[in-house]
Amino acid sequence: MRRADRLWAWFRRLPVVARLVLAVALTMSLVLAGAAGLVYWRVQTALDQQLDDDLTTYRHSLDQAVRTGSPLPPGPGGSLHQVLDGHGRILGASDAIRHQQLLTVAELSAAARGDTVRREVGSLLPITPGTLRFQAKRVTTGGQVRIVVAAVRRGHRDEALRELLAQLAFASGLTLIAASYVGYRTARAALRPVERYRRGAATFADGAQDLRLDVPTDRDDEITRLGHTLNHMLDQLAAASAREHQFIADASHELRTPLTLMRAELDVALHRPRTAEELTETLRSVDTEVSRLVTLANTLLDLEQLASGEHIQRTPVELARFLADASAPYRTAAERDGRTIKVVCDPATVDVDPRWLEPAVGTLLDNALRHGTGTILLRAVSRGGRLRLSVSDEGPGFPPDFLTHAFDRFTRAESSRTTPGTGLGLALVAAVAASHEGTARAENTSPGAVVTLDITC
């Protein structure tokens, strides 16, 4: 693995706070280095420009003096000079460099050809004594070639640049430390709610059922939205757990009775020899209970699927045809009892899930046939993206004390306890309405009763 890959893998293993602090520190280092480099370059350029201007002016005055044979003029503070012949012999020089050969052989040849030679003597860092900047230029006087070297000391310029470097390094270091500290505190403060959410989730994983995260309500940032999302997830998990417990409780409660009856029937049949007629009657009784168990299990599973909200698939449905198909299986039973099923609806197309809505309508029609009298009216009205679907009859209606919990599971009116049923029909109707983002309502009319579904379409 390459070094860069190893460094990246190491970086990704660090805690989030450490990664953020390192990213801030690296970014600030680059920014500070760029800013410091720019400042240093501007100051160095200004100092060098001033130094070069002084040096060029001094060299021109030296050239003029050598050309005219006048005494060499004094230069700016820290200035030095040398006058060489064409072979490089020093003819005159400042005391400090009287015996120091400033030009190399190559520089001497270049100056003799007429080129202007420029060079630095000594370095800024590490510190060296006797730092100079010089210019050398050929001057012809009386037919003789002279090389004039003008030099200035760089001590003040180098000292200023070294002081600037030290100050920039100190200021950049302090800024980097401050930025890293602020980045660390900011990252810790920003991620503190995440750690709190993690501890809350761990508590939920350990078995806490009613846990909800403490999410601030006066802000709307990414962490707060994460908290709201986690709370929504916890709500969904709690609802799923409640549905699971309800399903288990309902199944264990309602399955116990038919299973007990079947066990009793079989025990009696096996207690002593039975005739063929008695065994047949026992089997019929067992078959009735098995059918009840199958119906009960299917209804409970349907309720669980509807409660999960993941099985609704809306499709465009022609309302008149849908109601005709939903009521067709019950018309024969109605005619046998001398009753009629009347369908009234708008000529509209609705967006519903017929796989669930059709059995809900069938349940209401079956209840009206078994518990009501007179004409059964199936009415549907589609307005403004909502479908209002109702089934009414002309019977005695619901008992008043039953209306408040008509859609609860395993709830049956006293007058209907002698008829077959599981007490889950209206619960299924309410679940279908809720899955379609709607409601179900039961009420008495004069005469009879009406159950209404108000759903989106």
Image (tube, rainbow, N blue to C red):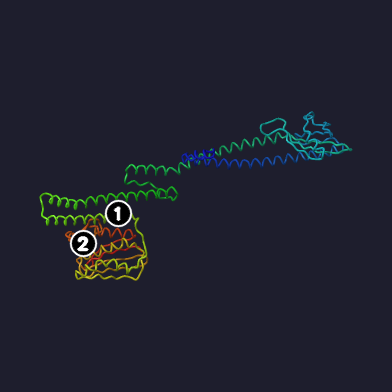
- Percent coordinates x, y for residue 184 in the rendering: 49, 40
- Percent x, y for residue 56? 77, 40
Identify which amino acid the numbered label 1 is placed on.
Glu
**Residue 239 horizontal/vertical position (percent):** 32, 51
Above or below, 208 against 305 in this view is above
**How far is disc 2 from disc 1 in space, using C-alphas?**
29 Å
Residue at label 2? 400
Whether residue 239 sits left or right of residue 420 in the image: it is right
Q: Nearer the viewer, residue 344 or 101?
A: 344
Label 1: element kind: helix
| Earlier-in-chain disc, 2 versus 1 | 1
Q: Nearer the viewer, residue 150 or 364?
A: 364
Q: Nearer the viewer, mark 2 or mark 1?
A: 1
Q: Residue furthest right?
A: 142
Q: Quadrant of residue 151?
A: top right
Which amino acid is tagged 2? Answer: Pro
- Judged from this view, the residue extending furthest toward the front is 276
Q: Residue at x 33, y 65 (%)?
A: 387
Of 420 and 307, the residue lying toward us: 420
Point out which mark residue 304 bears.
Answer: 1
Residue occupying image coordinates x 21% and y 52%: 255
Q: Which mark is residue 273?
A: none
Q: Residues within 10 Å of mark 2 (few under 14, many from 20)?
A: few
Residue in the picture at 66% in, 33% down: 125
Q: Residues within 10 Å of mark 1 (few under 14, many from 20)?
A: some
Estimate the x, y position of residue 11 in percent, counting from the top left: 50, 39
Indicate the secondary structure of the residue bearing disc 2: helix
